Each structure stands twice: as structure tokens, then as C-alpha cells.
Image: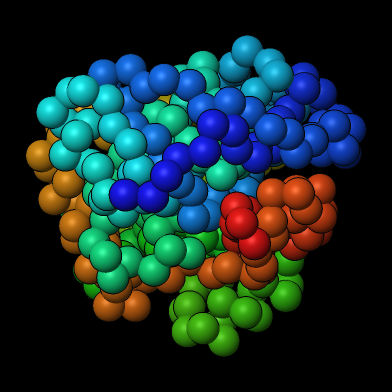
């Protein structure tokens, strides 16, 4: 086992700021001390950690999770466990390759080393690529958990907005495997053309004047009884009102920054429709540890077999955090930006 240093480099957010640019420019690369591990904790030498929309919202103080500042951001990443606490489950992870996450009031993954509870680690196969492992804990499980809603509803067709996102891409792959049609909603003509070139059959641009009419016609024609909403705001109402009777809208994000609105009360009363939320933490908790590992193994096989792939546009050392965020914010749909300690 390699020697463990007493200090490590980490990206530190001094305080929250609602202005994205100011929050980004306040980030600093600093040295921190490695503290003693509690019994149920592990020390992970990080290989890579992504920048996610949740990280941006967190820096602004607008996410549903807040931590004591100053704090190291980053909700997920991947690395190898180099030290473990005294509990049996923690010791079992020693030397293992893991995907990891942390949403408690502790430092995050944008660092050379990361301490977290053993329950926040997902053991990985050795042939799982590091870049894919870094983005494994959030989006793939979100897509899988959402698509279970379609399985439960025995859907033959579903609707999703933010269809150019990584979650949107994973949902398309899962749907294709189950022979379920997908109505993909995007905001830009360039994204529409890109999805069509990839083979997506049904793609709508929400910026077009006749978008709502097209959505109603298409959802009725295909009997799309489940919709996944990453946007919220008026889009939630548009999805809800456009679906056939008995449909359900599952809200899992709030990219619009606005409250859910425009839900037609007559659709609520007379069309037997459902509006619900999806929270990944609750999904993992309710799934149970053994079944969650079975799901993890299934998803890993899909990544290793290249059925699934997270698009990566660039990697940066921790010291270049501002450059990394500028690139990501400039074009999120192009792929993930990774922080790679030691690069």
C-alpha cells in the first residue's frame, strides 16, 4: 500500500454566492490536512470527479443540500480506497476501485483525497474505465431509477425533456433495449439535428410556436403515459396537460429555476393523471443495499460493454478549476468536464 501524505490539494468554496460567476471566481486551490478516519469511513485517492449541474446550484446556495462553509464542492467521483476505518464493511473496501458520493455536511470530491462513509461507495469492476467511473454514481442511476417508472407503468412510449443531456441519452438507450419509443424534447435546433443524426425518431423543439400542439398529437398517437421532467416551471404543466388520460409526470430537476406551474386543474380532476417527484437518494435508500448492488453490476456491464457511455469533453487539474467551470458552463450539452487530481 502506498504511503499517505499528511496534506492534500483541494478546491475550496469560501462561501455561497447566488451569482454563478462570482461563486466560480471565489474558488481556490488549497492544502488541507488528512484527518483520522472514523470506524465507518474510508480514504479515497481520487482519480477523477465531474462537474455537474447540482454542483453549480450548490455553489450558488440554491441546491437542496447545504454544507458548512468553507467547504470542498463535488458530489461524486471515483478513485481507489487507500485507508479504511475499523468496521468490517469499511475494511472490505480497502484497495478497491470505487465510485463515491457524499451529500452530508462534509468536504466533497474535488480534491486529491476524499473521506466518506463506506455506505457512500459503490465497488467497481477493475475494467470499468476511470472517466466513466467518475460519472457513475449520479446520472446512470438516475436514468435507471426513472426508467423503472416506465417499466411499472408498462409504457410503450415515454416523453423526456432536456433530451440532449447525459440522463436523456441513458434513458434513450434503456428505452431502446426495452423497445419503448421516446419523444425527445430539446431547446435548440442544433441539438434536435444531433439527436436525429444519432437515430432518434421523435424529437421536438420546445422553442417552436406549434410545439405544444405537436406534443399533444405525438403523445396521443404513441400513448406516451410517462414523462420525465428535468426543467420544471411551465414545462411541467405543458407535459402534464399534453399527455393522455392516466399519464404521469416525474419531475427530477429544476433547470428552469422556476416553480412548477400551468397544470390544468381539469386534467387533474377528470383525467386521472399523476404528478410526482424523483429523488435519487430516496430511490437508493428504498432499493435496498443488495438489490442496489445488483443494479450497479448490471449498469457497469453496460458501460464496460460500451452500451452506455458518458460523453467527456475535457479534463483539468484541480488548480485549473475556474477554466474547467468556464468550459462546462459554456457548453454543457457537449459532455462532462472532469477534475483530475495530479494532472
What is the residue that sits farthest to the front in this orientation? 3
**Observer able to see residue 301:** yes
Q: Position of residue 230 (x, y in %)?
A: 55, 44
Q: x%, y% of residue 80?
A: 36, 50
Q: Kindly identify the residue that appears in the image at 73 percent across and 34 percent down.
A: 30
Residue lying furthest top = 68
Give the answer, above or below, for where 282 lies relative to 316.
above
User: Which one is in front, 255 or 282?
Assistant: 282
Location of the C terminus by quadrant is: bottom right
At x 49% / y 55%, what residue is drawn? Answer: 47
Coloration of the structure image: rainbow
Q: Nearer the viewer, residue 98 or 236?
A: 98
Q: Which of the pair 306/159 is nearer the observer?
A: 306
Residue drawn 24% across and 62% down? 125
Q: Is residue 226 left or right of residue 205?
A: left
In this view of the protein, can residue 276 be seen by the observer? no
Estimate the x, y position of residue 161 in percent, counting from the top left: 55, 54
Question: Residue 60, located in which quarter of the rendered image?
Answer: top right
Report the residue at 78% width, 59% height from top.
327
Q: How many marks?
A: 0
Residue 298 x, y percent position in the rendering: 19, 60
Amino acid at each position: 500500500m502506498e504511503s499517505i501524505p499528511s496534506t492534500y490539494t483541494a478546491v475550496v468554496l469560501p462561501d455561497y454566492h447566488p451569482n454563478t460567476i462570482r461563486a466560480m471566481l471565489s474558488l481556490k486551490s488549497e492544502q488541507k490536512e488528512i484527518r483520522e478516519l472514523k470506524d465507518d469511513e474510508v480514504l479515497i485517492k481520487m482519480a477523477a470527479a465531474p462537474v455537474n449541474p447540482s454542483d453549480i446550484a450548490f455553489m450558488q446556495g440554491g441546491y437542496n443540500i447545504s454544507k458548512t462553509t468553507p467547504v470542498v464542492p463535488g458530489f461524486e467521483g471515483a478513485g481507489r480506497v487507500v485507508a479504511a476505518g475499523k468496521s468490517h464493511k469499511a475494511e472490505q473496501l480497502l484497495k478497491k476501485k470505487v465510485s463515491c458520493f457524499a451529500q452530508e455536511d462534509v468536504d466533497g470530491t474535488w480534491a486529491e483525497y476524499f473521506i466518506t462513509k463506506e455506505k457512500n461507495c459503490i465497488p467497481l469492476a477493475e475494467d470499468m474505465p476511470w472517466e466513466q467511473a467518475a460519472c457513475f454514481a449520479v446520472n446512470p442511476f438516475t436514468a435507471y431509477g426513472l426508467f423503472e417508472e416506465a417499466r411499472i407503468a408498462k409504457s410503450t412510449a415515454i416523453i423526456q425533456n432536456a433530451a440532449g443531456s447525459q440522463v436523456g441519452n441513458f434513458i434513450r438507450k434503456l428505452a431502446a433495449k426495452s423497445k419503448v419509443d421516446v419523444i425527445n424534447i430539446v431547446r435548440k435546433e442544433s441539438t434536435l439535428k444531433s439527436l436525429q443524426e444519432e437515430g432518434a425518431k421523435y424529437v421536438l423543439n420546445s422553442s417552436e410556436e406549434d410545439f405544444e400542439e405537436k406534443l399533444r398529437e405525438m403523445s396521443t398517437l404513441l400513448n406516451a403515459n410517462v414523462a420525465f421532467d428535468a426543467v420544471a416551471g411551465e414545462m411541467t404543466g405543458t407535459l402534464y396537460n399534453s399527455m393522455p388520460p392516466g399519464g404521469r409526470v416525474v419531475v427530477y430537476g429544476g433547470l428552469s429555476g422556476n416553480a412548477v406551474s400551468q397544470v390544468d386543474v381539469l386534467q387533474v380532476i377528470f383525467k386521472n393523471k399523476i404528478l410526482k417527484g424523483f429523488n435519487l437518494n430516496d430511490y437508493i435508500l428504498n432499493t435496498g443495499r443488495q438489490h442496489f448492488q445488483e443494479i450497479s453490476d448490471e449498469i457497469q456491464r453496460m458501460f464496460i460493454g460500451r452500451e452506455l457511455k458518458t460523453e467527456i469533453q475535457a479534463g483539468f487539474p484541480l488548480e485549473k478549476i475556474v477554466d474547467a467551470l468556464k468550459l462546462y458552463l459554456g457548453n454543457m450539452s457537449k459532455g462532462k468536464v472532469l477534475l483530475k487530481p495530479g494532472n
